[in-house]
Image (cartoon, rainbow, N blue to C red):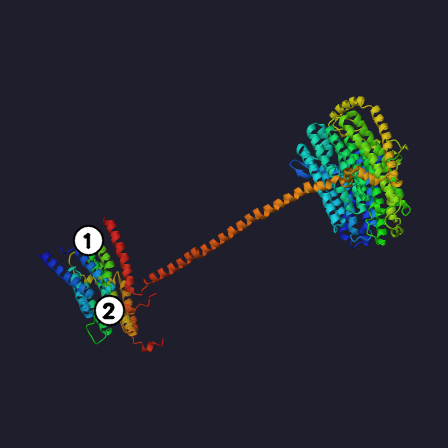
Amino acid sequence: MITQAIIVWLLPLFSFAVVLLNSKRLPRQGDFLSLATIFIGLFISMKLFGQMMMQPAGYQENLSFGWIPIGAHSIQIGVHFDILTSIMLLVVTIVSSLVHLFSTKYMEGDPKYGRFFAYLSLFSFSMLGLVLADSLLGLYIFWELVGLSSYLLIGFWHEKPGPAYASKKAFITNRVGDFGMLLGILLIFAILGDLNLQLIFTAVADGKIPMGMLTIIGLLLFCGAVGKSAQFPLHVWLPDAMEGPTPVSALIHAATMVAAGVYLVGRIFPIITPDAGLVIAMVGGFTAFFAATIAIAQYDIKKVLAYSTISQLGYMIMGLGVGAYTAGLFHLVTHAMFKACLFLASGSVIHAMHYALHHSGSHADPQDMRNMGGMRKAMPITYLTMLLATLAISGVPFTSGFLSKDAILGATLAYAIENGGISWVLVFFGFITAAMTAFYMFRIIYKTFFGTFHGGADAEHHLHESPKPMTYPLIALATLSVFFWFTAPKFNPFSTNGWFSSQVVTPARAYAGIMHPGGTFYFHPEVTAKANEVAAEQKKQESERTEHFAHMLAMILSLCVAGFGIWLSWTTYLKHKVDTDAWKQRLGIVYEGMLHKWWMDELYDKTVIAGSLLFSKLMAWIDANFVDGIVNGSAWFFRNLSFGTGKFDNRVIDGAVNGLAWVVGRSGDRVRTIQTGNIQRYLWVTGCVVGTILIVVIASTLL
Amino acid sequence: MLNNVTFFLCISCGLFVLGLLAVMTRKNAVSILMGIELILNSAGLNFVTFSHFSTGNFHGHLVALFIILLAAAEAAVALAIFLGLYRQRGTVFVDNASDLKQ
Amino acid sequence: MESLLTDVAIGFFALVTVVSAIFVTFSPRILYSAFALLFTFIGVAALYIIMSADFLAATQVIIYVGGILILIIFGVLLTARITNLDIFEQTQQRYIALLPVGAIAVGLFMLVLYTPWLNNPAPIKPTTAVIGKELIGTYVIAFEAASILLVAALIGAVRLGRERSDENAE
């Protein structure tokens, strides 16, 4: 099975390479190749999923090889395939293939059409690689690749300043989170020497990492999730990412890439200590609450959806933080479906608005809800699918969203009951956010599809439903937002005991803390025994009564809260019984905060960005004055040195050489006079020599 | 008293030195030839002296004979050369014969 | 008595020889030095006789005086301007020449005077017959070589001394 997973993974890479390089030569710029690879991937994923369902819970396959040799052993890298991987594979391929299909019509006419599909393939490859990775190393590699794909896709229309800035912002904000994650990875590597997840769990179970360090590592790794899944305070990039094309928003920033952070937390679940878990839950809960407040006040339809995404991601993180592994990942899957549907539907709406406004000569913003209204007559399919997805996100029964959100809220309530104290804040966050979610999501519905059209009468004539390649994905995704896909084989819309819960079992904690049934395969046998003891004890306290009680309470509360939200929205935006302007006045600064995203961007501008710019200016100053001064100074020094040596060479050395020649010449002249040609002179010389020798020899002999 | 080797050798040395001086000093080529003859004579005297006082045989006499012979031959050739020189230059003064000068 | 006579004879002829040699060296007139050379030769011949070299003395007189000296005088006369017979000549650098010559003189005299020569005079006897026998006997090769040398010298001298006019073409 794992080889088929690898095929699913590598097909989009092939498509990326071919389409990127040949888009001009291929017919239709190669989009069919992209579509083919991702749909083939989808079918294979579905087949794999079916096969996985036949296997017992906890089945997994691994394939790895030594990649970087260090000393005696080498760092392994490879592929891991279990039920979570299979589900993620399915999610990614479903959403990606539908987005591919949607884009064939949405991006029609764009000059870089082929390249768009190449980038979509690249993203698919990266995301699939991420979920298939069996070690933190592989995960990190694809983490970054996914970030790159996001950058490329957000800044697809990079000739405009908005997208260019937004893609930079996304990448850099992600990088901040990735830095923390990298520190966590390096810490693990420093302590353990390997990054394979199974090995890490085994090592932690053996007690190789103390709890304090483990908390730190967990939180550092969570930093990556904060960045990638747009949690507070690194959420600022996601609203700006809406500058990218809507299919991109649907694929990446709703369903898959942002879910990578949640996936990461899920994968490292066994090493999240209770302390780390509380922090994670707090961050998630606060994010959910915070983002919902902003979403209420936004007018741009995509911005509302963006903040809604942040908010829902906060839910998932909160769920994982309190230990509800199954619930959190469940919400991830359901959210992927209905959020993608919402984004694509909004894309459809914007597409229609764009066409209508263009043809009426108006320059109004096609994404501003204040220009919309009463569009359900003109776009019935879009309306119905969007409505269904909105019901799902609001947590209305009979939808998948109800089940997943309910699961999270129940788990949070159970956690608060057990742990008390500050964790009740999470409950507050969870339920209030649910109310707000329902409120602002239905606000979209009412403002867009009900009431009168505010974009101009002649524009209204031009409104029409989107073409089939755009509506089919909407229908597919809306259908997937219904409950029974997840409650199978049962049909109870109120039960979370479907295949998902039985298959996706919460893994046991590697440090032998809390144990839930069925997660023994992550362990070392001795630790398992100890963990079993602890679990048995825990079972007494954490009785089913508590859990069940919390669950029922949560369900009732969430229904109330959702109902309240929908009713308020209906009253305000459909019946117009509430004066919104008066409320804006009444809320005053609170409203301003909500409208202006609580000035987070401005804060970052003034602090982080200004600080960085100041630092770079300082560096530039040092370089220009100090460093250049040194360079110029040394240049001056060396130039003068060479000048001096040149002079020296000229005068002294050449002088010496010339002088020597002169001396030789003159002495030669003198010496030459010995050669007089006069033989008597020669004889005289000879006589001198002979005489000297004679005297010397004789004297020495005699004396 | 005077009839000993040393005295005769002294005479011979004196002749030699005077001959050498003549060769070095004189300008006229023929005068130089005369100096050479003096030197040769001193050599011959030397040989005969040793033959008479030291060895007692006649070998010294023979050598002196040959010296005389050679002196004759050499004088003849030298004078022929001098005549040629005179014809070429119009003079036999050796300071004008400096063709070896550098 | 006899030794006194010997000494006087030796002294006298030595004086003649050396004084004539001095004349040869230092006289400014060439003809004077040529005649002084004559007396030098005769003095040397006398000394030969005193040393029992009778044949040699005769040869000396005949060849040196009768041959070489005549040749020299011919040379002097032929290579001088005919107008004046007192042919003057300036010696050049006389004093500088004393340096090497002085050195050599000093060296030689030291050598001569300080060496313990073997001094046993041989008896005076005639030498002609012995020399003649030696020349033909033991030293015949040298003798013949010497005669060849003389022929060569003769030819050379004749060749060199010829009038140049008909040889300029060569």
Q: Position of residue A668 (x, y in %)?
A: 36, 61
Residue type, numbered disc 2: Val
Instruction: Please determine whether, in this image, residue A12 is positioned above or below residue B61.
Output: above
Query: For this rendering, which residue is in front, A405 or A453?
Result: A453
Q: Is residue A531 above or below residue A118?
A: above
Q: Quick check: A694 above or below A246?
A: below
Q: Secondary structure at mark 2?
A: helix
Q: Amino acid at mark 1?
A: Leu
**As drawn, is A619 to the left or to the right of A126?**
left
Q: Mark 1 highlights which residue?
A: C113
**Given the image, what chain letter belongs to the residue carrying mark 1?**
C
- C-alpha separation, residue under disc 2 versus residue under disc 1: 33 Å
Quarter of the figure that contains the C terminus of chain C? bottom left
In the rendered view, tell whether residue A278 sits above or below residue A626: above
Residue found 72% across the figure and 45% down from its top: A168
Looking at the image, can residue C129 be seen?
yes
Where residue C42 sits, quadrant-wise, is bottom left
